[in-house]
Amino acid sequence: MTTKTPIEHPKRFAAATPDKPAVIAGDVVVTYAELEARSNRLAHALRAAGLDVGDNLAVLMENRAEYFEIVWAGMRAGLRVTPINWHLSAAETEYIVTDCGAAALVASAACADVVASLGEAGPKVRLAVGGPIEGFEPYERAVADFPATPLDDECEGNWMFYSSGTTGRPKGIRPPEVGGPLGEPTSFSAMVRFLFGGDESTRYLSPAPLYHAAPSGWTNAVHRIGGTVVITERFDPEEFLQTVEREKITLAQVVPTHMVRLLKLPAEARARHDLSSLKVLVHAAAPCPVEVKRGMLDWLGPVIHEYYAGSEGVGFCYIGPEEWLAHPGSVGRSMQGAVHILDELGEEVPPGTDGRVFFESTRQFEYHGDPAKTAEVFDKHGWATYGEIGHVDADGYLYLTDRATNMIVSGGVNIYPREIEDVLIGHPEVADVAVIGVPDGEMGESVRAVVQPAAYPPADPAALEADLIAFCRANIAHFKAPRSVRFLEALPRLATGKIARRLLPPEVRA
């Protein structure tokens, strides 16, 4: 006799453990029973409004508890769900709402100004959460008359994320077909369960905005396996430690920028919190300086895990704490198809040689409405790339150097900003840094560091500039060191940890 595999879906835990917290958002606690009932009501409301399997639901809101019932309504109605960055301008938001073909938009009152200019563009179904928005129906009123029981035709939906748009307009990543049986195991939940030890006892902390792929994907997976999701409105280093202690967090995910800020807390602030519940701290999304990760391991012990992947899903590398200590700086070995490092002619290069990183991917995807961009991801072999430069060592561990689009060519020599940024972030007067190339009549481009100083404005900018350049020259080759430094009060860094270089002000590029 065969045993039926339990479904991976919060409805299973709504039946088995109805009073267990599914979501904790500050003082708001949502049980699995409440998550089930509320997501069912919205799923019925969306069906009644005409949304069918494969249609798109856009979500625009800050980190708040309602986000999860809205997402799960879409997921159980077979919809494609698109979270939208609530930091975007009205024009950028309108572009995504229109481009994804949203049949419904649920927005929070905090985003009223962003959606005010939509006018006739975008979906007719518009619901407002947490307060009124002109032209939007109040969310609670819209769902009030619908049942808390499941749809007769409920089936699996999927995400349709948009890339973060660090170099241009974001691109919609169209997922595989939707509409499969509800609760089928997913590769994401398998990763959380088997690679990072997730289960029903997991208490997962997400301090990052939920509109990003990783926080949305991880929280969704934790609900599929019956854990509890804890969210904060934003990342604050001391609040993060307080939350780990108070909520007995077992699993959390951060980006390297968060780790830098945690390490720059005073020693007494770090020592006053009991972090013994934390079994796994995962980081991803952006390169991590070696000394930052070493500092986290020295502080928290062997709980720091890292993976390298992307929303497109064409490659995945992983490295645990002990492996990393043996291969410092690596993002791990591929767990999803062989890695190939190719030169500019598309030919494979030997271990230790930098080139474009490609994966033998079995996953197919497309950028929504942009076949040319989709084609750029794949090479003549059908291998796929995220656009990074890197190399593998003799043991097959991958090391990332930088993104191909960030490379600076100075005097015919390729210079990668990440190496310089990793040095500068270790300077005590540097809170954040981005390295760019600027026009140079002699060299073509010269290296410039754009620095967010620990104290802004710096008391003596010229002296600090000279000190930072000297600091770099003491740690890396002189030709890589910046020839100039500009100071900003804050850098345009996304919540994923990536610098949005396109948003650097023109004056620092001149």
Image (cartoon, rainbow, N blue to C red):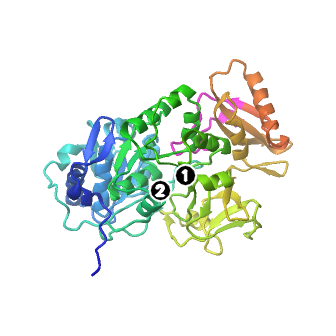
Residue at 68% of width from left, 56% of height from top?
Answer: 399
Q: Secondary structure at mark 1?
A: strand
**Which label belongs to residue 230?**
none
The amino acid beneath tag 1 is: His
Residue at point 40% right, 47% down?
204
Which residue lies under the disc numbered 2?
196
Q: Nearer the viewer, residue 421 or 294?
A: 294
**Residue at position x 67%, y 54% from top?**
326
Quadrant of the rendered image containing residue 60? top left
> Which quadrant of the figure contains the C terminus?
top right
The circle drawn on residue 305 is 1
Mark 1: give few (<14), some (14-19) or many (20+) Cα within 10 Å.
many
Instruction: Give the residues drawn in magenta, as a range.
Output: 486-510
Q: Nearer the viewer, residue 350 or 270?
A: 270
Position of 423 with respect to 166 (left or right) is right
Q: Report the front residue among 43 and 359.
A: 359
